[in-house]
Image (cartoon, rainbow, N blue to C red):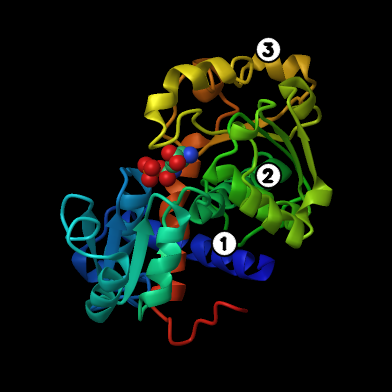
Amino acid sequence: SVPQIQNVLTHALRLKNISQKFLMPAKPQKISQKLHREAPPQSLSHASIALLFSKRSTRTRVSAETASVLLGGRALFLGREDIQLGVNESARDTARVLGGMCQGIFARVGEHSEIEELAEHSPVPVINALSSLWHPTQILADLLTLHEEKSFQAAPGENVGGALATLAPLKPLTITYLGDSTNVLHDMLVAFPRMGHKMQVATPNDPQYQCPAPVWARVKELGCDANIMWTEDPRKAVQGADVVITDTWISMGQEAEKEQRLKAFQGYQVTEALCREGAAKKDWKFLHCLPRKKDEVDDEVFYGPRSLVFPEADNRKWTIMALFDMIFGHWELYDPKK
Ligand code: CP
Ligand code: NVA
């Protein structure tokens, strides 16, 4: 729900401030002073978190491992080649066994049904670290980055050091997404409109690259479709944009379709020229979940002053840390329905 998202973001900002001061104080400190610094909560003290990853990951994995250290716990990276799952053992049995030994499961899977099966049979909470349909932890980082950026703009000259003391409200934004209808976009579709933001999406006019039926059903169920404009024209989609977002055209597992995809997405690359011709706002900003290829965004935008991609990547850690603290650290208090 929207209040839950706000709670996670507020908590992430708090943990970011505490952890950064704790790990990197403004000036060198003696060990005795170190002991008096405010430490991050140790809610995972003596706890183990299973990172069940059947696909590659840099940001999500490292966020989870480093966040677990800060919270006093330990993350166990269990890659596809490491455990019995999929070869000798079912998801059901794996969920029960991991849940009997660990205090949480963070899982990156292929088909979305796999994460549902894990969640159904696990005695401990399961968080989705990416599935074929959804990538919920990514948009938490995107939102935190936008809160920081927009508030920084609201007070020019004020040195907020890249992190705010409190979560500043975000004015309603026009958020454009160009390219493939991926797991990353899908979580934006069900979250951003409910937070008052307008979404303008451009994908090729081919059912293969448009929103899958179960995702669109959820979008409609939540009433988000009223605030989403969908077109095949990328210029139309960037009109009035405050933020332009894209994702890879070739998601993990789609490598064999590379040639056909590169052809289908011609014209959807995010460039200065496209956003100028389509009349995006003058100060539009750029987000990308990473990893990035040059196909979907050129170097000028990606490494330019509009790009927020690296603060966005950093914020994966603080938002995942907030989720781990709130859900795995205090799951006896956590009510997923609230
Ligand atoms: N954005 C993201 O999920 O990156 P990784 O695949 O590197 O975890
Ligand atoms: N859509 C991409 C996101 C990677 C973080 C994929 O699924 O590969």
Q: Quadrant of ligand 1?
A: top left
Decide which of 16, 145 is in the foreground and name it: 145
Residue 150 got which mark?
Answer: 2
Q: Left or right: 105 with respect to 113?
A: left
> Which of labels 3 and 1 is toward the front?
3
The answer to whether marks 3 and 2 mark residues whose Cβ atoms lie closer than 8 Å is no
Q: Residue 221's spot in the image, x, y percent?
A: 74, 62
- Say if 36 sits above or below 135 in the image: below
Q: Is mark 1 on a helix, strand or loop?
A: helix
Q: Residue 301's spot in the image, x, y percent?
A: 56, 21
The quarter of the picture where the N terminus appears is bottom right
The quarter of the picture where the C terminus appears is bottom right
Neighbours of disc 3 within 10 Å: few (<14), some (14-19), many (20+): few
Q: Left or right: 323 with respect to 123?
A: right
> Which of labels 3 and 2 is toward the front?
3
Q: Left or right: 62 with respect to 101?
A: right
Residue pointed to by mark 1? 9
Q: Residue 224's spot in the image, x, y percent?
A: 76, 54
At 49% from the left and 55% from the top, the residue drawn is 137
Q: What element carries label 2?
A: helix
Residue 273 got which mark?
Answer: 3
Distance Cα–Cα, label 3 vs label 1: 34 Å
